[in-house]
Amino acid sequence: MEENNTLKNYQNDLENLERYIEEFSIFLPLPICTVSPLGIIIDVNQAARDFTGYSDGEVIGEDLEFLFKDKKLAKSFFDQIIKNGLIKNQELILVDKYKKDISVSVSGATRKDVEENIIGCFLAISDITEIKKFQENLEEKVKERTYELETAKKALINMLEDAEEARKRIEEEESKTRATLISLTDGLIVFNKDRKITLVNPEAESALGLKENQILNREIGNISEFPNLTELYRVLGKKIEWTGQKYELVFEKPIKRYSQVSIAPVVVDKETIGLMVIMHDITREREIERLKTEFVSIAAHQLRTPLSAIKWTIKMLLDGDIGPLTSEQIEFLMKGYQSNERMIILINDLLNVARIEEGRIIYELTSCSIEKIIQETINNLLNITKNKKIKLVFNKPKKSLPKIEIDKEKISIVIQNLIDNAIRFSNPNNVVTVSISCDKINIEVIVEDNGIGIPKEQQRRIFNKFFRADNAIKFETEGSGLGLFIAKNIIEAHKGKISFKSKKGKGTIFKFTLPVK
């Protein structure tokens, strides 16, 4: 009876989780399609139904290409998602139920089970019709402006014949140019050669909390009464120069807004006559990222409780608390216990990623001994090294090292990850060496193995989320690809540095440093 109640509780938890995910999917304003590995649509959210006009019965079960005008391009896009795992911002033409062509930007990411097998993919669809119209209108305006400027040039050549008419035409051209710049949806500040402000469009006025006439013909460095403008100048390095870089700017007031800022030259007849600062609002993109992080965090928290209950229930069965078990029953329960443990580790990794993205990875700094943390980690891994026949060597320093201020739990995660990776990706009878040293500035920890190494062409991606090298996947199928991403962010949050050297088939050396003070 107790077992039935427990099973029923688990079933209720699962149903609640499924209902939660379904309700969250309905809430999402972004159209989402779920596609099988064969390219068959198996689910769409409410936003997707509203966007396409199709009901579930009309679209579910159809090929992915069903939704798009260019079937071949849609099929190629899906193949690229399955091959690469993630493809962003593919422009396609979606045909809705009413045969209306809609310009869309589609991003796709594969779905994988706990064994890293691809079980399909998610597609996120964004309507870019207005952006396309804007681009087309802008191109048309550019053509018009080019033609009008040529006309103005001819008028200037004949200015002796009709000086007044030429002057009026120039004024008209300037007015049209200003009107075009003012109508842009991005914030725009134009500077002349002397770096004085000559134009501020309405979008920039709104973002900066000022009026154009308050700052016209002034140098931005001499303006201090507008906090948002001061913050913009600070983000640009307190200089107005064309560097080709893009900067991220956050305005806290009147409402929190995110902008991507760039500087471009204003060129007329191959001569640079000034610069313009362009502020592109990315608040919506940041909000989507925040919602994604919140979703991962909430989902992980909701999953951890039932997984913990499953763990302790199986543990009770294995310990014989409910009665003796046969060897076959123990074997099956052990497999379930180990799979559950892997799920708990994955959930913890996802929660750590969410904390990193929210900027709260470090909780509690205490004075700790790195040497002691390494020894505790090595002790915990002795069974693994014994089973894999790996020799684990700890080169302790001759003199005791100073204690440093760190988050012990998080640094333990880094050390555990690096040593565990060295063991898992080494062949039997190999050696894994851990060394520690200190100078007056930093404590340095080195983990070295002579295992499978990392292919050179994939080394630049080794600290990316969810990335695993091809040879690592073949050698050890299990793994989330989050460990090194988490480790890098933990070390950098402690003002430290992490790096590595590796050669395929020869081994890898990971090194990180932490400041002594």
Image (tube, rainbow, N blue to C red):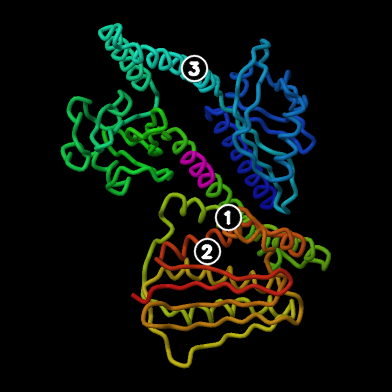
**Which quadrant of the structure image shows residue 125?**
top right
Amino acid beneath label 2 = Ala
Is the residue under label 2 in contact with that under label 1 (CB below 8 Å)? no
- Give the mark nearest the N terminus, 2 or 3: 3
Q: CA distance from mark 3 to mark 1?
A: 43 Å
Q: Secondary structure at mark 1?
A: loop
Query: Would you say residue 345 is visible in this rendering?
Result: no
Q: Position of residue 343 (x, y in %)?
A: 64, 55
232 on left or right of 332:
left
**Which quadrant of the structure image shows residue 425?**
bottom right
**Callout 1 environment at 10 Å: few (<14), some (14 to 19), or many (20+)?**
some
Q: Position of residue 34 (x, y in %)?
A: 68, 33
- Give the mark nearest the N terminus, 1 or 2: 1
Amino acid beneath label 1 = Asn
Please provide the residue range marked out in magenta: 289-298
Of badges 3 and 1, nearer the viewer stands 3
Q: Secondary structure at mark 3?
A: helix
Q: Secondary structure at mark 2?
A: helix
Above or below: residue 21 compared with residue 360 = above
Please tell me which residue lies in front, 85 or 373.
85
**Which quadrant of the structure image shows residue 115?**
bottom right
Above or below: residue 260 compared with residue 433 = above
Q: What's the magenta bit mostly, secondary-structure-wise?
A: helix
**Of all residues shown, which one is farthest toward the front?**
160
- Label 3 belongs to which residue? 143
- Label 1 belongs to which residue? 464
The residue sitting at 37% across, 14% down in the picture is 152
Assess whether residue 424 is covered by the magenta stretch: no
Of badges 1 and 2, nearer the viewer stands 1
- Image quarter where the C terminus lies is bottom left
- Label 2 belongs to which residue? 487
